[in-house]
Each structure stands twice: as C-alpha cells, then as structure tokens.
Image (spheres, rainbow, N blue to C red):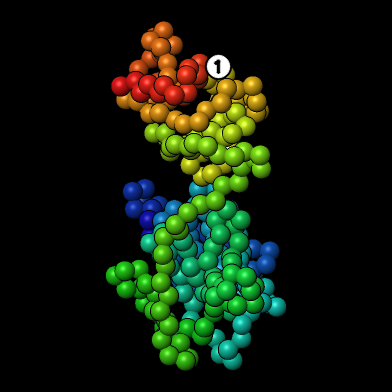
Amino acid sequence: MLALGTDNGVILYSIPKNSFQQIDIRTATQTSNDVESVYQDHLGDIWIFSKDPGIVHLNLVTNEKEHLFTPKDEIIKHGRKSRKLIFEDNAKNLWLLPTEGNFCYYDRKERTLKPLLTDINNPKSIFSPLVRSYTLDNQGNCWFATARGVEKLCFFPQSYQFNLTDYEAETRAFLQDSNKRLWTASKSNYIQIFAPDGNLVGYLSKQGNIIKENNRSIMGYIRFWKTKMEIYGWGLKKSDFSNLKRQEQIITLFTILNTRQMILIV
C-alpha cells in the first residue's frame, strides 16, 4: 500500500487491488485536511501530520480516526517551533513529537499520548527538547540535535510486567503453558489463569475446567510439575490419568498423597 499526502486528505493506493481510496482526515477537533507527512506503524495504522496542532491516528481496519494532541497548559514552549517526528523503538513503542506539542509516546491501552518523564515521581519533569533534527542508529537509540547540543535517548526492553491479583492470593507456584497463559497457585487453595496480555481468564475448578468465578473448595497446590504430556500435579496413580488424552494440554487436579512423596510422570 502507498499513502499519498495531499492538500485534500490522504490517498491510499492498494497495489494488489490496483485501487485508490481518498480519506478525509478532519475531525471535530482537527479542521485541517492538508497533509504534511504520513507514517505507518507495525500494526498497519496510519499517523498523519497536518498543519493543525497534534496528530491524526487512523485505523485502516475499523476506519476509526482520532485526533491526539498535547494539552495547551502542558506544552513546553521554546520560542520557536520544533521539528515533527515519529518512530517506533525496538520494543514497538511509538514515539512522536506532534505539531506544537511535547515529545511523548502513545499508550495503546489507554489510547492517549503520554510524556516522557525524567523523574517518574515528578509529573512536571517532562523531557521535550527543541528538536532541530534527529536520527536512529543501528542499536535503536535516538539522537536529537537540539538548541543546546546533542541528546541521546536509549530504549531498553521492559524487564517485567506487574499483574495485580487478589490481595489474599499469596502465590506459591506459577508456570506458563504452551499458549503463553500464566497459571498461578495460591496459599488460599485456588488457581488463577491469566491471558498473555495479563488479563484474568478465570479459575481452575475441581473438575479441571476454567471457570469465571473463584472456587475456594479447590484442593491446595504447593508446586507444579510438568510432564511430557503437559499434566501437572502432585503424586498420582495410574488410574488418576488413564482417561486423559495425551494431546490435551490441560491441568488436572489429583488427590494429594504424602507431601514428602513427589512423583513426576514421564
């Protein structure tokens, strides 16, 4: 696909279909249809700079448009206009400097622009220099030519993700299955299953099913054991898993035997 910026919106050309589509970028808060530059991110969304403050985000799948901008009371003024910029780092985070706005990143969950803070405990410590030029090096670092010299911005991958569980859930064991779901066993005698994005899928019932409501009658687990059949549990007998299919990737509860005796089925 080719995107052409014009003084009357964006023209999208589909090479496989050999067809054109003209898109009006105006919104309720953005009245200009004059396109200055266009950027496409890794998800295929279009980001459009116009002469008006901010930037227009266009979802080509849903045809939804949103105008994003820095609030006037938060804009850091330098006495002259900064260069507009937009790029994605190695972790696929989208960074941009919108028209007449601050340097920021796009929070995809909250669908809003958020500033880069030099001190996370100080909301006024916004990093937004006057950018005259910029470039990305082979390591993914961004170099700014500013009014005061050269600034280097490094992007490191997120080292962890915090998922809030029940306050009474003292986690005793956890594992990740082949579908990238996280299973956690708590001291309170129940097991939670979380999707790869961190959202709660449900709880494990005594029958081995995933249910939406917590079943506190479930028997306790202290540790998970993973077998080649991807069955997890404490010591068990052959009769306990004789009816299970080998290809089913599930967690099944078994009667707890002597806690000093752990049997790993291979």
Q: Please state if 151 lies on the left or on the right of 202 as rendered.
A: left
Q: Quadrant of the image for the C terminus?
A: top left
Q: Is there any visible trace of residue 198 in the rendered image?
A: yes
The residue sitting at the right extreme is 73
> At which x and y percent is residue 138?
29, 70
Residue 71 vs residue 2, the one in the foreground: 71
Where is 132 relative to 18, above or below?
Answer: below
Q: How many marks?
A: 1
**Residue occupying the far front of the picture:** 260
Identify the image quadrant of residue 126: bottom right
Q: Nearer the viewer, residue 214 or 55?
A: 214
Which residue lies at the image location 59% right of the left edge and 57% below the top edge? Answer: 111
Viewer can see residue 99: no
Q: Position of residue 24 (x, y in %)?
A: 56, 62
**x%, y% of residue 135?**
36, 77
Q: Residue visible at 40% across and 28% down?
A: 225
Find residue 102 and report its image quarter.
bottom right
Going by the numbered disc 1, the residue's amino acid type is: Gln
**Residue receiving disc 1:** 207
21 over 118 or under it: above or below:
above
**From the image, which quarter does the N terminus lie in?**
bottom left
Q: Residue at x 55, y 16 (%)?
A: 207
Q: Is residue 245 left or right of residue 251?
A: left
Q: In terms of depth relative to the viewer, which is nearer, 234 or 201?
A: 234
Q: Secondary structure at mark 1?
A: loop
Residue shown at 60% from the left, 77% from the top: 125
Question: Around disc 1, counting alpha carbons within 10 Å, would you say few (fewer than 14), some (14 to 19), or many (20 or more)?
Answer: few
